[in-house]
Amino acid sequence: MSLFEEIGGMPPIEVFELNKLYADDPSPLKVSLGVGAYRTDEGKPWVLPVVKQAERQIVEDPSMNFEYLPVLGLEAFTNAAASMLLGGDSPAIKEKRFLAVQAISGTGALRIAADFLAQVVPNITRIAYISSPTWENHRLLCLKAGFNEVREYRYWDAQKRGLDLNGMLEDLRAAPERAVVIFHACAHNPTGVDPTQEQWRKIVEVVKERRLFPILDSAYQGFASGDLDADAWAVRYFAEQGMEFVCAQSFAKNFGIYNQRAGNLTLVANTANNLANLKSQLTILVRGNYSNPPAHGARIVSTVLNNPQLDAQWREHIKTMSGRLKAMRALLREKVEGLKTPGSWKHITEQIGMFCYTGLTPKQCQFLMEQHHIYLLKSGRINICGITTKNVDHVANAIHQAVTTIQDDDVDKKA
Ligand SMILES: Cc1ncc(COP(=O)(O)O)c(C=O)c1O
């Protein structure tokens, strides 16, 4: 008998499953609104011109080789990443009260953070709080890191299709001291709804009051407003308030280098005293995990961020991407409203970033997939980049049909 025979299976990962269904669908009408990746108006991935230019520079650099990077990564990259996040004039940077660790994209940075908090930092309550809803990997990675429990704090108010601030504050107030809380730094996935600055102030008050430990997840800097500094406001506010925190950065989306797995974890402490020990702990964590990170993606980001001309070009690319998102939101809303689809659709343009939490029910989503070849998550989250000037009518008509024909749970009879 095999040792492996009795192992049960695990459920598929919805977003990857959806991708496969889309790829296998022969229909010319098919639309992918699932995976969170940027698409052009032709529905194609976009390799940013500045990334191509940086790659050429890297390849042609005679000093380039494939030696191992240090365990904590390429310093030119991690320093530039921390500065892009905290701001060039950040007191934490000037006073050297921070550590930056290269990571396997945003997910890897979150995982280092969760491992570090669950396994190394004393006096942390091994209960992690995640928003309801959130990017589904938050729960999994906290559990894998060794948190005993993952709890949800209220975030989304389905009635008003906006932030449930009171519910959120109430849940955070009820959290045990030194529990860990994951916050999305901007462009919340999946709802596209961020707290306002005033609301962030209230949230930070409660975090302080309850002595909670924040993990900030910054996967979309630049995608919310098109402006890197504006999108880092919440992170910088935590720093300004003297909070200790960690922040996971992904460069997958804002550089369009998804499979290069370029990420960074920044730790901000309120003293520089013990950073050498923390650094050695993080080094051992990474060493026992994957030893040292891959270089290419980090080299691309570092080449761009450390060159003012390339950096300026990149900031323009970010405006192009976020601008297209805004334009597609406006167009989709106009089309759905033009069809007099029942309900309010202003949330399509009120939400920001890559995603729109449409409010469509799981049955309506199923109907869109089965009847109209439009692939989206069961939660009703759509990736706005999947909308183009060519497919928007098809998508709007399908949404109209779904909303007008599929009420509650009667999809099985209609579809
Ligand atoms: C909220 C959030 N955090 C983190 C990530 C991590 O992305 P990656 O590991 O590709 O950088 C994502 C990606 O979809 C995300 O949406």
Image: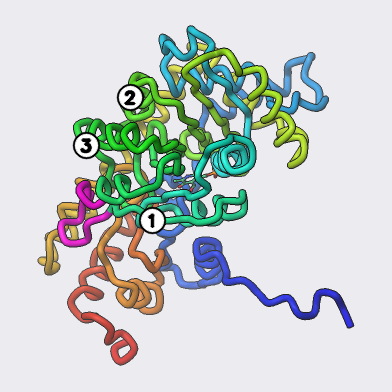
Badge 3 marks a residue whose secondary structure is helix
Which residue occupies 43% across, 20% down? 86
Q: Residues within 10 Å of mark 3 (few under 14, many from 20)?
A: some
> Percent from the top left, x then y, of residue 408?
24, 80
Which residue occupies 40% across, 25% down? 243
Which residue occupies 51% across, 72% down? 25
Badge 1 marks a residue whose secondary structure is strand
Q: Would you say 99 lies left or right of 277 here?
A: left
Sooner in the amino-acid sequence: mark 1 or mark 2: 1
> Percent from the top left, x then y, of residue 310?
51, 17
> What type is the residue that disc 1 sits on?
Glu
Relative to 83, say whether 44 is above or below: below
Q: Would you say 205 lies left or right of 374 here?
A: left
Q: Which residues are magenta?
A: 156-167
The mark found on residue 237 in the picture is: 2
Badge 2 marks a residue whose secondary structure is helix
Mark 1 or mark 2, whichever is nearer to me = 1
The mark found on residue 152 in the picture is: 1
Sooner in the amino-acid sequence: mark 2 or mark 3: 3
> What type is the residue that disc 2 sits on?
Tyr
Relative to 384, say whether 18 is above or below: below
Q: Is residue 59 magenta?
A: no
Residue of label 3: 199
> Percent from the top left, x then y, of residue 147?
56, 51
Q: Residues within 10 Å of mark 2 (few under 14, many from 20)?
A: some
Q: Is residue 260 visible?
A: no
Q: Residues within 10 Å of mark 1 (few under 14, many from 20)?
A: some
Question: Which of the image's four quarters has the N terminus?
Answer: bottom right
> Percent from the top left, x then y, of residue 368?
34, 73
